[in-house]
Image (spheres, helix red, strand yellow):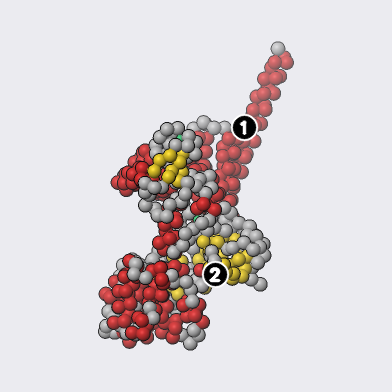
């Protein structure tokens, strides 16, 4: 039985609502994509298996057009269906390989159109009834871009005059832009990375947005989506998904939603000028030096102006949006110019930016994120790890956790990866310090146990990831490392026990000596 139903109101339009209490980790629904294809300005992918093509591609021998990863892909069932292959064949010689490579997103539009010709038109009906925001897009920049798309499809006779009149292509492009989920190539092994693909999931598209989601989405190699509750979802509550970058500030998130999804977010996070107490957009006050200068009313645009009022929550002094804008622009320019392959320059930037920004400011978080990735690469490469770098990496992970607890409560992929990343420096620092006799065996044990706790929680969260995904692979690695760590903890426990016994013996001896005297 379904745990949800489709409901509708003036605020969200159609949306999904829980019809029973749902526990964290419980599957709410699984959804199959009706269409998967290259995104606008996509990199080259195999049109059949959706793997990245990094070097030479193989041209489908039947249609002599579709870029595939190899001959083996011609005979496997995938996205380059017989219908698509046949359609391509008919479009020759007008449609050429270079044309296709230049307009990869056309394929996704074409795949949508082909749904119409399938014997079962159910998927077409589900697709074409989705929200396209056609009127809001009319005559905007994006409309003009897709006029070209329409023209190419018309020239190829994929659509006819009547379709242009009915604005079919614009509608499909709108549906793709508003509803599609970004996907990664089916062979991608980079954590959290999004690639050149998009997919339309009719059920998942009905989840309404909230800047603090209550679901966990996972998509496997076959593009099957599993949606779970990330926190307890009460009966009657909407089922939310966060369409934006969780670590972005309110102005940028709302702008992204306004530009791409055509609505003004009024969620609790957006309405709260402290961003749930995290101050992701707050500035430092020039007078009282606290970093709680906030914009009291969310601006209608990310372009701050004179009329936007910013207020220090502590000394109550006010300043205007254009003053804030100037500071932000200066900092962003510096960030763009620094050497991002040098940890020191990123650290210097963070210290520089912290003079004007709250330490949780999204620009600082962005810099910390870059620094963490850089440190990971350096530490992975060099076996002689410097303690300073390990401490820095640990510090950054520790900074992110409380933020993620608020912004991605419950099941969180970001939190899982952060915890995994965090367990490594704890162990390495503890071992270094113990070898140098800077800490006792009891302290070593404590530290290793805290690392074990991090890793255990990381595994608990990563178990919700598809086994073949990069995060699923990380889970396997984490489980192997957990066994090793358990061994190390046991060894440390023995050492600690011996150390305590030694201590006792010495104390006893001292007491004895005292008594004799
Ligand atoms: Zn392939
Ligand atoms: Zn073909
Ligand atoms: Zn919001
Ligand atoms: Zn102040």
Residue under the image location 47 percent in, 59 percent down: 264
176 relative to 269 in the view: left or right: left
* Picture quadrant where residue 338 is located: top left
Q: Quadrant of the C terminus?
A: top right
Tell me if mark 1 has few (under 14), some (14-19) or many (20+) residues whose alpha carbon lies within 10 angstroms of its own. some
Residue under the image location 45 percent in, 56 percent down: 254
Per the rendering, the mark at residue 469 is: none
Q: Which of 182/313 is in front?
A: 313
- Residue 307 x/y as whole percent: 39, 47
Residue positioned most to the front: 307
Please determine whether, in this image, residue 96 is positioned above or below residue 45: below
269 relative to 94 in the view: left or right: right
Residue under the image location 55 percent in, 61 percent down: 240
- Residue 497 x/y as whole percent: 64, 36
Q: Can you tell which of label 2 and label 1 is closer to the viewer?
A: 2
* Disc 1: residue Cβ within 8 A of ligand 4's nearest atom: no
Q: Which of 26/373 is in front?
A: 26
Q: Which residue is mark 2?
A: 14
* Picture quadrant where residue 447 is located: top right
189 relative to 22 in the view: left or right: left
Q: Which of 94/417 is in front?
A: 94
Tell me if mark 2 has few (under 14), some (14-19) or many (20+) residues whose alpha carbon lies within 10 angstroms of its own. some
Q: Is residue 471 visible?
A: no
Q: Earlier in the sequence, mark 2 or mark 1?
A: 2
Q: Which residue is mark 1?
A: 499
Residue under the image location 41 percent in, 75 percent down: 172
């Amino acid at each position: 039985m379904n745990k949800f139903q489709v409901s509708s109101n003036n605020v969200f339009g159609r949306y999904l609502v829980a019809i029973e209490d749902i526990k964290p980790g419980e599957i709410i629904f699984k959804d199959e994509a009706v269409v998967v294809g290259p995104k606008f300005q996509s990199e080259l992918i195999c049109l059949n298996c959706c793997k990245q093509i990094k070097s030479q591609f193989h041209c489908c021998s039947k249609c002599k057009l579709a870029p595939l990863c190899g001959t083996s892909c011609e005979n496997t069932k995938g996205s380059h269906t017989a219908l698509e292959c046949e359609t391509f064949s008919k479009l020759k010689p007008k449609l050429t390989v270079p044309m296709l490579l230049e307009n990869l997103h056309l394929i996704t539009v074409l795949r949508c159109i082909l749904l119409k010709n399938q014997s079962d038109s159910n998927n077409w009906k589900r697709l074409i009834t989705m929200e396209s925001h056609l009127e809001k897009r009319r005559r905007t920049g994006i409309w003009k871009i897709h006029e070209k798309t329409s023209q190419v499809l018309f020239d190829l006779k994929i659509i006819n005059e009547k379709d242009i009149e009915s604005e079919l292509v614009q509608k499909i492009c709108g549906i793709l832009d508003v509803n599609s989920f970004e996907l990664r190539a089916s062979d991608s092994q980079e954590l959290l990375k999004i690639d050149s693909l998009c997919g339309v999931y009719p059920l998942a598209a009905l989840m309404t947005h909230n800047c603090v989601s209550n679901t966990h989405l996972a998509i496997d190699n076959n593009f099957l989506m599993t949606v779970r509750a990330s926190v307890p979802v009460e009966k009657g509550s909407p089922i939310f998904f966060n369409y934006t970058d969780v670590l972005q500030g309110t102005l940028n998130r709302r702008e992204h939603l306004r530009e791409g999804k055509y609505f003004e977010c009024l969620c609790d996070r957006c309405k709260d000028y402290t961003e749930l107490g995290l101050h992701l957009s707050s500035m430092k006050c020039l007078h009282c030096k606290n970093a709680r200068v906030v914009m009291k009313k969310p601006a209608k645009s990310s372009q701050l102006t004179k009329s936007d009022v910013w207020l220090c929550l502590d000394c109550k002094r006010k300043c205007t949006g254009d003053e804030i804008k100037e500071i932000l622009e200066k900092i962003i320019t510096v960030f763009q110019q620094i050497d991002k392959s040098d940890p020191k320059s990123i650290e210097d930037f963070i210290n520089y930016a912290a003079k004007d920004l709250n330490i949780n400011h999204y620009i600082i978080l962005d810099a910390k994120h870059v620094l963490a990735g850089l440190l990971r690469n350096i530490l992975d490469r060099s076996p002689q790890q410097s303690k300073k770098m390990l401490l820095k990496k640990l510090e950054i992970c520790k900074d992110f956790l409380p933020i993620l607890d608020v912004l991605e409560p419950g099941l969180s992929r970001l939190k899982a990866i952060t915890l995994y990343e965090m367990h490594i420096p704890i162990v390495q620092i503890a071992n270094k310090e113990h070898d140098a006799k800077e800490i006792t065996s009891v302290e070593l044990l404590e530290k290793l146990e805290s690392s074990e706790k991090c890793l255990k929680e990381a595994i608990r969260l990563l178990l919700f990831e598809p086994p073949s995904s990069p995060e699923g692979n990380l889970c396997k690695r984490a489980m192997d490392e957990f066994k090793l760590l358990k061994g190390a903890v046991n060894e440390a426990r023995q050492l600690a026990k011996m150390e305590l016994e030694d201590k006792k013996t010495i104390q006893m001896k001292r007491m004895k000596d005292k008594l004799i005297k």
